[in-house]
Amino acid sequence: MPKIQHGASPLLDPAYQLRISVFGKLSIAYRTQVLKQIGRKAQALLGYLVLSDVQEATRERLVGLLWSESAEQLARGSLRHALHEVQLALRAVDCSYLKADKLAVSLEHQRLQVDLWDVLELARSGKVHPILLERARITDTILAELDGVDTSFGTWLRDVRQFYHARLVTSLEQALPDENAPLTNEPTECVARALTLLDPGHEKATRHLIRSRWAAGDIGTALGIYTALWQHLEKEFDAEPSPETQGLVARFRIEQPQTVAPPSTLRGWEEPSFSDQIGSDPRPSIAVLPFQTLGPVKEH
């Protein structure tokens, strides 16, 4: 499994870091220039060197990863071609961080700035990188355009996505306070939002969001979050929210106020992307429901 990287060396001038984005389409820039487009095999080669747990990979390993179904002689020739393609692209921007000899290929990790590493670094300190709020299951987009390059590479890529997803969830979970603590504040709410986007079935994070939105008088969003959780669990696992989550919403319904406070001023809640994720109208509203009904909120 990949190791958690710590990013480029702080002693290296940021202008001379090779900046790499692995979310979605692989993007590489050096100084003021963006590397020209390279083929999918060359991208996969570079992506592996960036996200692998070692800075150096043997040619044998690369051949088995990217040309697993080709004859050895043909595969080694294809590797030479892909390496030449990457080296030409790097030389065009005067970057020499990729090294290759007859046995192995290496990339200087200490000279890299990778967006995934930045996201992980913030998560370890209990903070949320904006990338995590862009869409659900963002880790599924790691090297997204390279699915299908090779069956062996596909297996490796699936494991890498799962690994980083688990590390992000674990790090952010540690930033969630005890549920008996005082009302959720903005930073904690942001962490909970990121967790529910990474894992729509994360009930503890969902309860934090429900409590926070309800306390702010944003009843419509609170119930919409609950509805989205119920629908996700029902669709993916044929299950219902836990008794703890259902009990929380039941208590809130019983205590439902007759009036609703003004909309929350917490930054980000007006963003359409999050409203789309939870599937509810972000404007404050009162949902009049039978107290015995613990299922998702129905629209009338």
Image: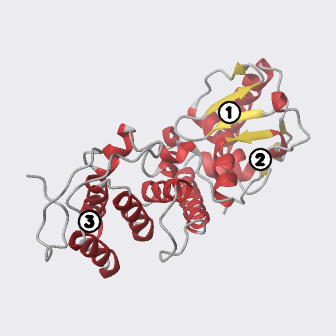
Task: Please tell me whether residue 98 is drawn above or below residue 154 in the rendered image.
Answer: above
Q: Is residue 67 above or below residue 42?
A: below
> Label 1: which residue?
82
> Residue 141 appears at what percent x and percent y?
49, 45
Question: What residue lies at 78% left-to-right and 51% top-to-bottom?
Answer: 58
Q: Secondary structure at mark 2?
A: loop
In whole angstroms, how far apart are the C-alphas of marks 2 and 1? 26 Å
Look at label 1 and name its amino acid.
Answer: Ala
Labels 2 and 1: the sequence-earlier one: 2
> Could you tell me the amino acid type at mark 3?
Trp
- Give 22 or 295, whichever is nearer the viewer: 295
- Element under disc 3: helix
* Residue linked to disc 2: 7
Q: Nearer the viewer, residue 289 or 104?
A: 289
- Outermost residue, right side: 11
Image side of residue 152 versus residue 42, left or right = left
Expressed as whole percent of the image width and height from the top left, the position of residue 71 reads 61, 46
Quarter of the N terminus within the rendering? bottom right
Q: Residue at x 62, y 26 (%)?
A: 38
User: In this rendering, which labeled residue sits more in front, label 2 or label 1?
Assistant: 2
Figure disc tally: 3
Position of residue 230 measured from the top left corner of the image (x, y, whole percent): 26, 65
Say whether disc 3 or disc 1 marks the residue closer to the N-terminus: 1
Q: Earlier in the sequence, mark 2 or mark 3?
A: 2
In front of the other: label 3 or label 1? 3
- Give the image quarter of residue 10: top right
| Amino acid type, residue under disc 2 in the picture | Gly
Q: Is residue 204 above or below residue 66?
A: below
Residue under label 3, please give it: 230
Q: Is residue 211 left or right of residue 109?
A: left
